[in-house]
């Protein structure tokens, strides 16, 4: 039962993050969120890579300091190889390679989507890990997937979005309502005050376990245009009801697919992750599903749901045990299949 110390780096999108893990325990998990994208209403890739370049060294120093360990104690460096924005990934990959060379310790490449799933195995007193097999639904601004997880390294994507991610559906709907980016949390907030049955939006007709959210955005756009023509104050006067109805539609879509996934696989353990897992509606529906459908549901702490390096570190830990190391000529991959 040897102790290994992994330094993990995550830079796939707009958060620069570094974490130190000792085996499955998180000693530190520092995340620098880039505020710059807010005024553009979405992530600007070029600005993201520049901000990573500025943030990465201070963030790593902070992670080491908070973990109270010296870099000479590190056993390996894990980094996000993909999927993500190329300019952002390159910053983390280049940094990780240089440090692994400098310290003469192994380099470990990590798939970001696998990390969202294995985040459930971070050892934490508040949080239980699922037994295999389980279904993992990763829902965020960049991803919407249902994965059948058979073991740490055997995963099968059984459903994914054909267009927008679910977080984008929240954010783009919010934008149509004049709410600032990212609008997901605001829709959640106003939805609590509204009637979810006030307005009806069509659910997309997509076969099997795949998702589609681009049609919903369009129907919300037409709905708002029509209503504002009749009453220019329509959105302001009905904000809570509109938000509640949009959220209701999105949650129905997610729950329908989860129910179908359970039916098709017979697996009733459901783990969710990604930023949208913070949504209070999805949380209460999953909590209710334990009674209602006999599911066992797992929701990690919020800090391990959104993009973070601790989840990269837990994959690093499992790969370290397998001695699954990367070569120094490894390249980042914007598209990287699970
Ligand atoms: O995982 P994350 O931080 O970053 C990636 O996109 O990878 O997820 C961010 C997404 C955004 O689309 C944001 O609007 C959404 O998660 N989000 C929420 C809530 N909190 C964050 N969506 C709905 N309700 C929330 N409470
Ligand atoms: Zn992510």
Image (cartoon, rainbow, N blue to C red):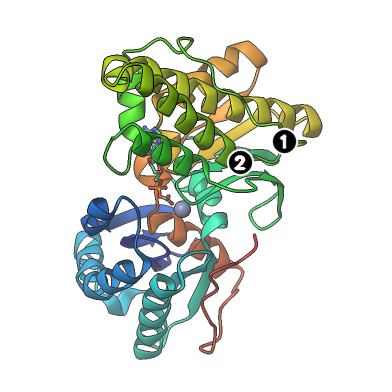
Residue at image mark 1: 206
Where 228 falls versus 156 (above or below)?
A: above
Please say if 148 is above or below 126: below
- Badge 1, how many Cα within 10 Å: few under 14, some, many 20+? few
CA gap between label 1 and label 2 equals 20 Å
Residue at 43% across / 72% down in the picture? Answer: 89
Closest to the observer, 54 or 37: 37
Residue at (56, 36) in percent of width and height: 271
The image shows residue 311 at horizontal and vertical percentages of 45, 55
* Residue 313, quarter of picture: bottom left
Helix, strand or loop under label 2: strand
> How would you rate the neighbour count of disc 2 (Cα within 10 Å): few for under 14, some for 14-19, many for 20 or more?
many
Q: Residue at x 33, y 37 (%)?
A: 183
Residue at point 53%, 28% (across, down): 250
Q: Is residue 71 above or below residue 318?
A: below
Above-or-below relation of 133 to 98? above
Does any portion of residue 184 appear in the rendered image? Answer: no
Q: Looking at the picture, how far across and down is residue 122, in whole percent?
A: 45, 48
Disc 1 to disc 2: CB gap under 8 Å: no
Does residue 84 appear in this view?
A: yes
Where is residue 34 drawn, in percent x and y?
25, 58
- Find residue 136 and name its label: 2
Kindly state the secondary structure of the residue where label 1 is placed.
loop
Q: 333 or 310, which lies in front?
A: 333
Task: Classify residue 285 as left or right of residue 234.
Answer: right
Q: Earlier in the sequence, mark 1 or mark 2?
A: 2
């Amino acid at each position: 039962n040897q102790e290994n110390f992994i330094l993990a780096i995550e830079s796939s999108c707009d958060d620069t993050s570094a974490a130190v893990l000792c085996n499955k325990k998180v000693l530190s998990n520092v995340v620098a969120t880039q505020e710059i994208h807010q005024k553009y209403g979405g992530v600007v890739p070029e600005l993201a890579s520049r901000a990573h370049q500025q943030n990465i060294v201070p963030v790593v120093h902070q992670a080491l300091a908070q973990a109270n360990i010296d870099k000479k104690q590190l056993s390996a460096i894990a980094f996000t190889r993909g999927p993500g924005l190329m300019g952002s990934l390159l910053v983390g990959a280049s940094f990780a390679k240089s440090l692994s060379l400098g310290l003469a310790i192994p380099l470990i490449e990590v798939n970001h989507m696998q990390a969202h799933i294995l985040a459930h195995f971070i050892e934490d007193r508040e949080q239980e890990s699922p037994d295999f097999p389980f279904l993992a639904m990763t829902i965020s601004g960049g991803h919407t997937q249902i994965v059948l997880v058979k073991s740490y390294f055997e995963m099968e994507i059984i459903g994914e979005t054909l267009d927008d991610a679910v977080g984008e559906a929240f954010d783009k709907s919010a934008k149509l309502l004049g709410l600032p980016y990212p609008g997901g949390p605001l829709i959640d907030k106003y939805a609590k005050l509204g009637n979810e049955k006030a307005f009806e939006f069509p659910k997309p007709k997509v076969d099997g376990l795949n998702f589609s959210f681009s049609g919903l955005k369009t129907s919300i756009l037409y709905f708002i245009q029509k209503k504002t023509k009749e009453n220019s104050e329509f959105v302001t006067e009905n904000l809570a009801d509109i938000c509640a109805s949009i959220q209701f539609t999105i949650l129905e879509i997610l729950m329908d697919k989860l129910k179908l996934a359970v039916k098709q696989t017979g697996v009733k353990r459901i783990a969710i992750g990604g930023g949208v897992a913070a949504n209070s509606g999805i949380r209460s529906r999953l909590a209710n599903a334990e009674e209602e459908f006999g599911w066992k549901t797992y929701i990690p702490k919020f800090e391990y749901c959104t993009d973070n390096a601790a989840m990269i570190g837990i994959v690093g830990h499992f790969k370290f045990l397998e001695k699954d190391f990367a070569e120094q000529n490894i390249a980042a991959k914007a598209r990287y299949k699970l």
